[in-house]
Image (cartoon, helix red, strand yellow):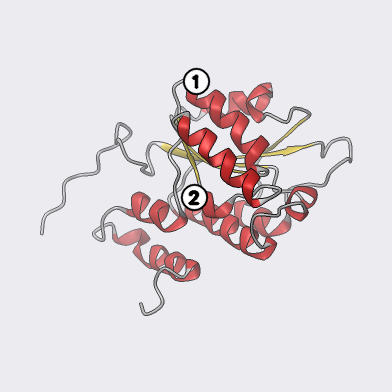
Amino acid sequence: MTSFDKRGSDDRLLSPDNSLLTIIDYQPVQVGSIGSMRHSDLLENASLVAKTARLYNLPIILSTVNAHNQRNSDTVKPIKDVVGDIPSYDRSSINAWEDKDYNEAIKATGRKKIIILALWTEACLTFPTLDAIAEGYDVYPVVDAVGGTSTIAHETALRRVEQAGAHLITIPQLLCELQRDWNRQDTVPEFVKLLQENGAFTNL
């Protein structure tokens, strides 16, 4: 068995060399207002995506809204515990793409594939996704780690961004796409562990 070398940053698929993760507005008010999935599942899944980004050394761009003026609190602890002490870009804009510091942080990575987690699906995920696509980025909403105020709001928003060119993805697919090859031994143990946490593997 002989694998090809890694494709590098020009890989058409998601890879550790061409992707970044952005996490937008996983704050208590937003989490508490989600009606499309259980809050505990949402936080577990979002944390798992953050662990995936850490495993494959992806840049993580974290953002909040209205934390500076105390209308809202900071990113929730389960996610902060995973991402650690990284910059957090607080905004007044609902659309993160319209915040100068956040926008510059995304572009400074030099990467064109954006894996996105944002609450709500119908606003803080949809708006930057549409703007990023219009500027030539590939955007990948992780559908089992985001949520809307209702099931119909969540599903309608996903249809809208998909029609605009977003690439919907699930956690197991994200993990497998970043790992790609069992010969990449350094990340295999944690790769399997994360799949087990997600329930994709129960007997490994």
Which residue is at the far left? Answer: 1
Q: Could you tell me if the residues under marks 1 and 2 are in contact, i.e. CB atoms within 8 Å? A: no
The N terminus lies in quadrant: bottom left
Residue at 47%, 36% (x, y): give it: 162
Is there any visible trace of residue 22 in the rendered image?
no
Number of marks in picture: 2
Of the pair 135 and 123, the residue shown nearer to us? 123
Tag 1: residue type?
Answer: Ala
The C terminus lies in quadrant: bottom left
Tag 2: residue type?
Answer: Ala
Place of residue 67 in the rendered image (x, y in percent of width and height, measured from the top left)? 82, 39
Residue at 57%, 59% (x, y): give it: 45
User: Along the polypeptide, which appears first: circle 1 or circle 2?
Assistant: 2
Graded by Cα atoms within 10 Å as few (under 14), some (14 to 19) or many (20 or more), the crowding at tag 2 reads many
Instruction: Report the mark closest to the observer, 1 or 2.
Output: 1
Quadrant in which residue 95 is drawn: top right
